[in-house]
Image (cartoon, grey):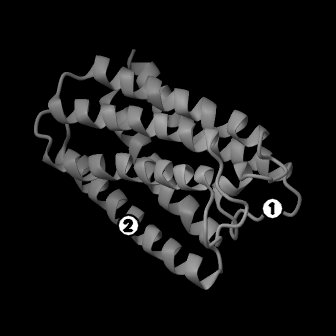
Amino acid sequence: MNDLLAFFGLLPLAWLFIGLYIAGRLYPQYSHTKQFCSELGALGSPTQKISPIINNFPLGVIFCILGMLMIQQVDNTIIFFTALCVIIHGIGTVIAGLFGMDLDPYIKTPSRSGIIHSWAGFIMFISLLLPQVIILFEVEFLSYYFKLASFCYFVLTLYFTVQLKLSYHQKTVPGLYQRLSYGAQLVWLAHLSVYLA
C-alpha cells in the first residue's frame, strides 16, 4: 500500500509531461510556452478528441485513486480533507476534458463548453491550493520541514499564477507559467504522497 501511494503520487507528473508532449506533437505548430495545456483539447483544435483521452481522463482516474489511497493509508482529519480535495481535483480534470475550452483563449463571449471548462479549471486550481495551506496546521504526521516545503510550494504556485495572469494579458508566454504553476502543485502532491508512504 505504501508503494502504491508513492507511485500514484508521482505518476501525475510523469503522465502529464508525456501526455502533453505527445498531444503537442499531434498539434501542428503548437507552442508549449505560448499556448495553454487546455488548447490541446479546445473546441475545433486538431487534437480536440485525442487530448482528453491521453491526458484528462486517465489523469482524473489517477487523482481519484491517489485520494482514496491517502484516505486508506492515514487516519487524520486534515489528510482526509486533502484526499477529498485530490478526488475533487480528479473529477474536475475529467470535466475539463469533457467540456473543451474555446479555440481562442481571448474570446469575448465564451461558449457554454468554454464556461464549464473554465469553472472546472478553477475548481482544479483551488482543490490543490487549499490543502497546501490547510496542511500547515496538521500536527500528527507532518514535520516542520515538510510544512516549510509546503509553504514554499504554495508561494511558488501563487507567484507563477500571478505571472500567468500578467503574461495572458500581455499575450507573451502564458503556457509556460501555467505549466510552472500547476507543476508546483503537482510536485507538492508528489512530495506529500511520498512522505505519507
**Three-letter residue code for mark 2:** Leu
The foreground one among 174 and 138 is 174
In percent of width and height, residue 160 lies at 46, 69
Q: Residue at x 24, y 56 (%)?
A: 148
Image-based side of 176 in relation to 31, left or right? left
137 horizontally vs 175: left or right: left
**Residue at figure coordinates x 61%, y 49% from the top left:** 113
Displayed quadrant of residue 15: top right
Of 13 and 127, the residue lying toward us: 127
The residue labelled by disc 2 is: 158
Other-residue count near label 2 (Cα within 10 Å), few / some / many at <14 / 14–19 / ≥20 = some
**Label 1 belongs to which residue?**
30
| On-image quarter of the C terminus | top left
Residue at the farthest bottom position: 170
Residue at 62% over, 32% down: 57
Q: CA distance from mark 1 to mark 2?
A: 26 Å
Q: Nearer the viewer, residue 165 or 8?
A: 165
Residue 24: x and y, percent? 79, 52
Q: Is residue 42 above or below residue 99?
A: below
Q: Is residue 150 left or right of residue 171?
A: left
Crowding at mark 1 (Cα within 10 Å: few <14, some 14-19, many 20+): some
Which residue reaches farthest left? 139
Query: In terms of image quadrants, where is residue 158?
Result: bottom left
Find numbered disc 1 in the image and state the secondary structure of the residue it sits on: loop
